[in-house]
Image (cartoon, rainbow, N blue to C red):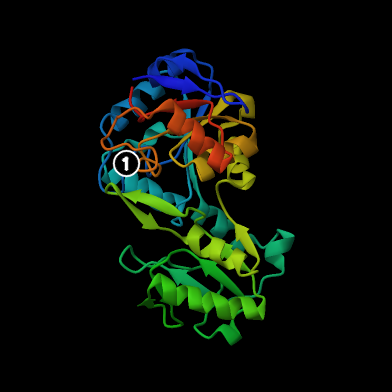
Amino acid sequence: MMGRSFSSMPIEFQTINGLQQLAETRRFKAWFLDQFGVLHDGKQPYPGAISTLEKLANYGTKMVIISNSSRRASTTFDKLRSLGFDTSLFVGAITSGELAHEYLLRRDDPWFTRLGRSCIHMTWNDRGAISLEGLDLQVVDNVEEAEFILAHGTEALGLPSGAALSMMLEDLEKILEQCVAKKIPMVVANPDFVTVEARALRVMPGTLAATYEKLGGEVKWMGKPGEIIYKSALGMVGVDATDCIAVGDSLHHDIKGANVAGISSAFITGGVHATELGLGKFGETADNSSVHALATKYEAYPTYVLPSFTW
């Protein structure tokens, strides 16, 4: 397996012999790892991912899961354990859902201080609705009563009873049109546009948030590529940004976020961009020119490019 190193524009390639050699340089004290598209596809671990984590841990590497999941960090660890991962190898996990929960709970940030308590809640249904317990929020299904939108999912509308009403994406977008007319803000607890799920792509809340912004709505993005989630991860490991590397499969979230945070990055090509890169099977190496074009398109420039998170 070959990896390639990017510099800032214009992009230049430098050959490196894969993730193992990168680890053996001991250049990075902390690794920030995305989960979907890097470690697993939502249903099963990628080949070699579990053993790769174990080998990294043997080098004394501090590892943190940094994910745009709308779930709490504890739920993320539960999911990883159910897939066979040893979560004791990680210093911790920080998710968009955890950040959103913390800021809505504390209300010490000026932007969140101004939010009301009644919200339109866009959530999951098939994947399991997300609880708002402990946040002292009133879920409403009437836009006229709402003070903000909380976007956790793209499958359902939360009801005052606590149940979730299944809705098509188009119907949720119609509700957003009503919300923008009222000029109420949105908190998006998962900025991903799509995610990998069993080799297919699933629409995520970031798509709703992007739609809301295009309509003229105000959005607070609680996760990658925003710097807020990287600051939280840096606080967990207690090392300088120059000693960290972020590993992810999304150029517009993982890699652009690392660029914003001033840390190195490794782009895993077999995730959400696999189809765009013309990749048909796990571990297949992307063409240099295709990666170059895609990085330029998204204005997101990885330090290294690898086909998979495999030692």
User: Between residues 86 and 283, which one lies in front from this camera angle?
Assistant: 283
Q: Residue at x 31, y 48 (%)?
A: 42
> On screen, 94 above or below 262?
below
Residue sitting nearer the eye, 222 or 303: 303
Tell me the quarter of the image containing the C terminus. Answer: top left
Report the side of 64 relative to 220 (left or right).
left
Q: Is residue 70 above or below residue 144?
A: above
Q: Does any portion of residue 135 appear in the rendered image?
A: no
Residue 143 in picture, x, y percent from top left: 56, 83
Q: Which amino acid lies under the numbered mark 1 shown in the image of this protein?
A: His
Query: What residue appears at the point 65 percent right and 80 percent down from the top-left corner?
Result: 182
The answer to whether residue 120 is visible is yes
Residue farthest to the right, as pictured: 110
Q: Position of residue 114 (x, y in %)?
A: 72, 69
Q: Position of residue 132 (x, y in %)?
A: 48, 68
Q: Position of residue 272 (x, y in %)?
A: 39, 44
Q: Which residue is mark 1?
A: 40
Secondary structure, mark 1, is loop
Q: Residue at x 31, y 37 (%)?
A: 85
Give the residue drawn at x 63%, y 60%: 220
Q: In the displayed structure, does residue 87 sit left or right of residue 305?
A: left
